[in-house]
Image (cartoon, rainbow, N blue to C red):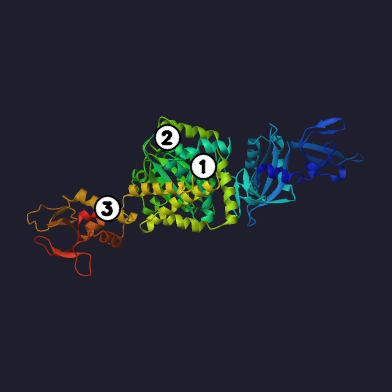
Amino acid sequence: MSEAEVIELAQGLDVDAAKPADAFPAEDDRPCWRCYDNAVKRDGKTWRAGVYWHGIKEAKGDDAATLTDTWYCDPLHVEALTASQEDTEHGRLLRYRSATGHWKRWAMPMHMLAGDGTEVLGVLLGEGLVLDRSRKAGILDYINTQRPRQRLKAASTTGWHGAAFVLPDEVIGADDIWYQATERTAPYGTAGTMDGWRDAVAARAVGNPLLVLGLSAAFAGVLLERLNIDGAGLHLFGDSSTGKTSILAASISVWGGPAFRRTWRVTSNGLEGAARMHTGTMLALDEVGECSPKDLYESAYALCNGHGKTRSNIRGEARQVARWRVFVLSTGEVTITSRMAAGGFEAKAGQGLRLLDVPVTGAYGAWDDLHGFATGAGLSDAIRDGAAQHYGHAGRAFVLALIEALAADGDLSGRLAVLVGRFKAAGGQETRAARIFALCALAGELATQAGIVPWKPGQAAQAALYCFGLWRDHRGTDGRNAEDAAILRAVADFIDKHGDSRFSGLDDHEAPMIRDRAGYWKDGRDGRLYLFTSGGLKDAIRGYDMGRVLDALDGAGAIPERDTGKRSKKARAAGGRPVSLYHIDPEKLGGGR
């Protein structure tokens, strides 16, 4: 439900606020707290609106007791008790009036009162509540002692909570949930109109598959939990001024304005916090070159795996692990892998299959259809301007449409499986990548079906298929999995680097002394073979298990000679004893190079 609906629902729940505006409580009702939305007139005097402590000052001797009325702050109501579905994360829903006269709401976690309450007062002051600084502790007591009748469920993250979808300023699909968090929230928001966004942003994706993919990715985060996917991500890379950031700006406009964009210039811990803030939607990260290779290496798994590190508290006990489900859309001039390599970190296959590198290769940078603009830069500027003026409507409309679609036909998994089959992926790793592109395709097709984007049916799926081809061509593994390709590449690079210095002819009796020998070579009818010693091959493929390496070489047909039942072959070097050597054909390593 929207904030306006919750305000209407909660009106009148505070018993104290319902008291007549011209009456303070009688002596029999004191001591007590009261909150007045308007000024109170009493005995010819006007008392300012706000929270009062109505007390009794005991009389001395035969004197009558004195009634006291002490103002603490401007109007502040405690409208509801909040708690998670598991009866944890208790809080209070506060409604208060700022110094500029605007009513605001905040679901305050009760644990913020465990100390001196400075955090609570800081939030209220920052949001414009006027208070008496000499009575700060009393304001906290007032909040703590209120027991309103209304009960709401507390949601500490955005995204799905049961059948409802929670954003910081709106809950879609339920009227008994409120967003409650201590940390900062992502700047979700709306501006302009849905029609304006459709014309200025979404319509310009027609004929531009990379932009179709980017917008589809912005919707895809909503599907993650419904499909039991922990997370996924795409990384658009290419030269500067090609339109990557414009695609990111367009995608961001599905959920919020320009402030929704984040950069990679943050630590791995900071990225965990950012992912949690964007749960259920999209985390947009610009310029991967600003992230240190070490932080990138540590974060590539976590961002799309959906959970952070296990950390301990001051007593050495394990804290609760931060969790999220988010679709990451990233940009940069270099790939994720090459940025890691710049710091000496070798990317593992799993990292490359969580954030997929997609090259920006259009006829005009990122664009294939300029939509009447003279240059790609002109189209980029128009898209960014449109995204800055009209934003935040499409994501909410997509959630609402999905709730209705699930009620009618909840078989999202079946539709995803059909789309994955269209990619004709070779092997398990390509299938994992295909599933991410298919997820975007499904989101885009659902948005098309709901009329959120002005695309023809099948356009989102076709764009995802096209971009999957870009990813596969850039990956260059000829259908092999990433580990096999990396092993073949490592052996090939080792031969290129050390073929003349650490190898000599098998039958060369006059060969010079070889330091750190890695093996021998011999020429045959089909070319030269490199005969690796066991130590030489291990040196070439550090970080990989020997059996795994031999499987990859064997699968590529790179071991043409061997003894029966083995993958090595006995050979006698010039003047030496027979040794077991691995006969490697470098021509068969080409698929990994």
Does the rendering let one see residue 184? no
- Identified at 58% across, 49% down, the residue is 401
Q: Amino acid at mark 3?
A: Gly
Q: Amino acid at mark 2?
A: Leu
Q: Nearer the viewer, residue 190 or 283?
A: 190
**Farthest residue toward the left?**
510
- Identified at 51% across, 42% down, the residue is 454
Which of the 4 quarters of the picture holds residue 377? top left
- SS for tag 2? loop
Q: Which residue is mark 3?
A: 591
Select label 3 or label 1 by which is in front.
Answer: 1
* Tag of residue 454: 1
Residue 558 image point, x, y percent: 23, 59
Estimate the spatial distance between the alpha carbons at disc 2 and disc 1, rounded to whole Å. Answer: 17 Å
Q: Amino acid at mark 1?
A: Pro
Q: Which residue is mark 2?
A: 370
